[in-house]
Image: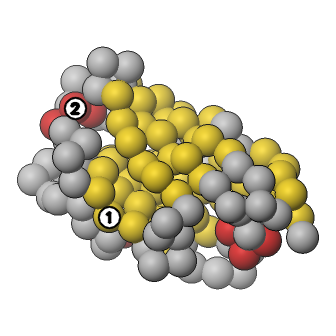
Amino acid sequence: QVQLVESGGGFVQAGGSLRLSCAASGRTFSTVTMGWFRQAPGEEREFVSAVNWSGSSTNYADSVKGRFTVSRDNTKNTVYLQMNSLKPQDTAVYYCAAARYGYGVTAIRGHYTYWGQGTQVTVSS
């Protein structure tokens, strides 16, 4: 069992930065891929980024490549999403998720078993 709690969301102007954190409980955190997804009002939840168990492999949606950076600290059971050059279209609720054991940096929602409650990110123009 893994419990996930996101933090760090907020309101920022376009071009600004935010750093999201996701604190995990459970012994399996350091062995599984962690992902970030987001959901805007009226939209499907979409993949943003993922990092494998060791932090050596990452994956990004095309819309955030070059602006967002995912990382993790297994000693703190925490995964991070550094978001720079934010745009109004980045406005959404951001969720972290833990993948099933054995998956790499997958972008497929169904490969993730545990989800946090989400944190709101609002970017004004």
Question: Can I make out residue 90 in this image?
Answer: yes
Confirm or deny contact between disc 1 and disc 2 (CB under 8 A): no
Above-or-below relation of 102 to 42: above
Image coordinates of residue 124 in percent, x first then y, are 88, 64
Check disc 1 and report its element: helix, strand or loop.
strand
Q: Amino acid at mark 1?
A: Asn
Q: Given the current orientation, which residue lies at the most extreme right position? A: 125
Tag 2: amino acid = Ser
For label 2, the residue is: 30
Colouring of the image:
secondary structure
The residue lying toward the viewer, choosing from 96 and 59, is 59
> Seen in the image, is 38 located left or right of residue 65?
right
* Count of numbered labels shown in the rendering: 2
Q: Secondary structure at mark 2?
A: helix
How many residues crowd mark 2 within 10 Å: few (<14), some (14–19), many (20+)? Answer: many
- Compared with 51, 85 (above or below) is below
| Residue position for label 1 | 59
